[in-house]
Image: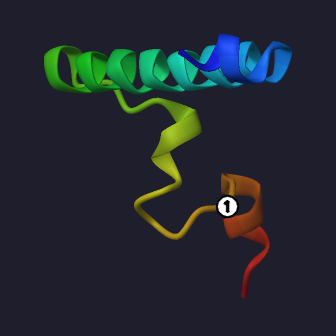
Amino acid sequence: MLIPLYGLYGAALATAVAMIFEAAALYSVAFRRLGLKLVVFSGLSNGGGSASDKARRP
């Protein structure tokens, strides 16, 4: 739908949206079925930042 309207930019946007959706769906399955907390998304619930950032804070 986006490609005929926006050409190459539409294709890039559609690909980016599909990849984000796929990553979110895979994360959801890994978390629910296996109880895995992925490093990329684990910082979102506790204020963000990396472990090394937290170690440097007073």
Is 25 on the left-hand or right-hand side of 4? left
Is 56 on the left-hand or right-hand side of 50? right
Q: Position of residue 26 (x, y in %)?
A: 37, 15
- Report crowding for label 1: few under 14, some 14 to 19, many 20 or more residues within 10 A (C-alpha): few
Is 14 on the left-hand or right-hand side of 28? right
Q: Position of residue 31 (x, y in %)?
A: 26, 26
In terms of image quadrants, where is residue 5?
top right
Q: Position of residue 41 (x, y in %)?
A: 50, 41
Residue 1, relative to residue 37: is it above or below?
above
Amino acid of disc 1:
Gly
Task: Look at the numbered disc 1 and give the secondary structure of its residue.
Answer: loop
Taking the view exactly as shown, the residue that stands out farthest to the bottom is 58
Quick one: 31 or 10, which is closer to the camera? 10
Residue under the point 48% across and 20% down: 23
Residue under the point 58% across and 36% down: 40
Residue under the point 79% across and 72% down: 56
Look at the image and tell me in which quarter the C terminus lies. Answer: bottom right
Is 37 on the left-hand or right-hand side of 58? left
Quick one: 58 or 7, which is closer to the camera? 7
Q: How many marks?
A: 1
Colouring style: rainbow
Residue under the point 22% across and 25% down: 35
Q: Position of residue 32 (x, y in %)?
A: 16, 24
Q: Which residue is mark 1?
A: 49
Taking the view exactly as shown, the residue that stands out farthest to the left is 33
Taking the view exactly as shown, the residue that stands out farthest to the right is 8
Quick one: 25 or 15, which is closer to the camera? 15
In terms of image quadrants, where is residue 36?
top left
